[in-house]
Amino acid sequence: MECQRRRRWFSSAWFLILGVFAFRVTQAVHHKHVGQFTAVGTSYSLLELSGISFIDDIELASYNNIHQEIIVKIPWAAKVLGVEYITEMRNVLLGHEQNLHWMMYHLAKNYINHDYKRNHTGQLLADCETDNDIKIKSNIHLIWDGEEYYRIEEEDGQWEDLKPEFKKYQYVLDSPFWTDIRKSYMNKYCLDMMRKIVGYKSLKDNVPPEVTVSRHVNQGGSIILSCTARGFYPQSILLRWEKDGKLGVWGNETSSGILPNMDNTFYLQVTLELPPEASGRGYTCVVEHIALKTPAVYPVPEKPTMEKPWALALFIVLAVILLLSCAGAFIAWRKRKAGMHVMRER
């Protein structure tokens, strides 16, 4: 008896832990800030410097050295950042024009083609990501004439050189001066800026997922349950399987992972493979998302879902029948009309 009580207590505690973890995952909100800076010039001059900033795939701000002005594309975001903050960023970009000119001069001068007069393009891509306001990733990529030659993951802290001809410049990137600048800028202008914006207001309205649940039987007799969530935003979501309202490990689970759609929404599919002897009854897919007030429960169909090729074939057959029916009715109408015309002439 004591052993059974311990097992029950352990099971209850384990499912409680799972429930708390699921709640935390659902409440976590993922955000990503991407900055892209492009410099075009020769060994003699810097012709253009432009920058663009995206948060959660939505354009936030842009900069061009011709106008020497930061343009914030979202009015309320400009108020959140404040005039002083935006002016400080602008002054930083103005101050770095000389550094970029130096970079253009040395890279173009020592470029493998030794073509000093041609235009070259240098790019810096920086991105940072948070989940539940905790930094999870931060990267920088350096690109020269369309080819990446250095990159660094902030967590690792080591520059990875990808082109042997640029290795001699790594001492500059590793110097204490540029290391301090890199860390300071990534914290202040990537992470802190994003936190200011998303902490005030969402850049995009929350969109609930469209969920479909299906049931299939594969050639080996196994039962395949699929739960698909489409078109949701933000990307943090939880899909889990329950049987008779209980959590558990019921079979072999696989997931597509959260994938982006073209409209900046997201997609996720999870499947559960059950052995042939399983009945497949009583299963539900439970979906939790910030756009849903409460977890949504979707029962699995009791009968296998019609396969898409059969559905498509049926749709085509019905469409052909409808088309032929309409054509036949039209021909019959034309014949009747022609017959009436002939009778009138007589």
Image (cartoon, grey):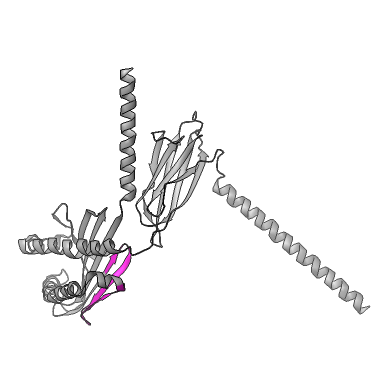
Q: Which x, y percent locates residue 50?
A: 23, 75
Question: Quarter-wise, where is residue 116 in the image?
Answer: bottom left
Q: Residue 12 lies in magenta, yes or no?
A: no
Query: In the image, 67: left or right of 170?
Result: right
Query: In the image, 202: left or right of 220?
Result: left
Query: In the image, 204: left or right of 145?
Result: right
Q: Is residue 235 above or below residue 88?
A: above
Q: Farthest residue to the bottom: give it.
A: 67
- Compare residues 147 and 176 and report the one nearer the observer: 176
Range of the magenta residues? 53-75
Q: Which x, y percent locates residue 133?
A: 24, 55
Q: Farthest residue to the right: give it.
A: 346
User: Looking at the figure, which quarter contains the C terminus?
Assistant: bottom right
Q: Which x, y percent locates residue 16?
A: 32, 36
Magenta-drawn stretch, dominant element (helix, strand or loop): strand
Q: Residue at x 78, y 66 (%)?
A: 331
Query: In the image, 220: left or right of 44?
Result: right
Q: Residue at x 34, y 31 (%)?
A: 12
Question: Quarter-wise, where is residue 40 in the image?
Answer: bottom left
Q: Which x, y percent locates residue 142?
A: 19, 64
Q: Residue 66 lies in magenta, yes or no?
A: yes
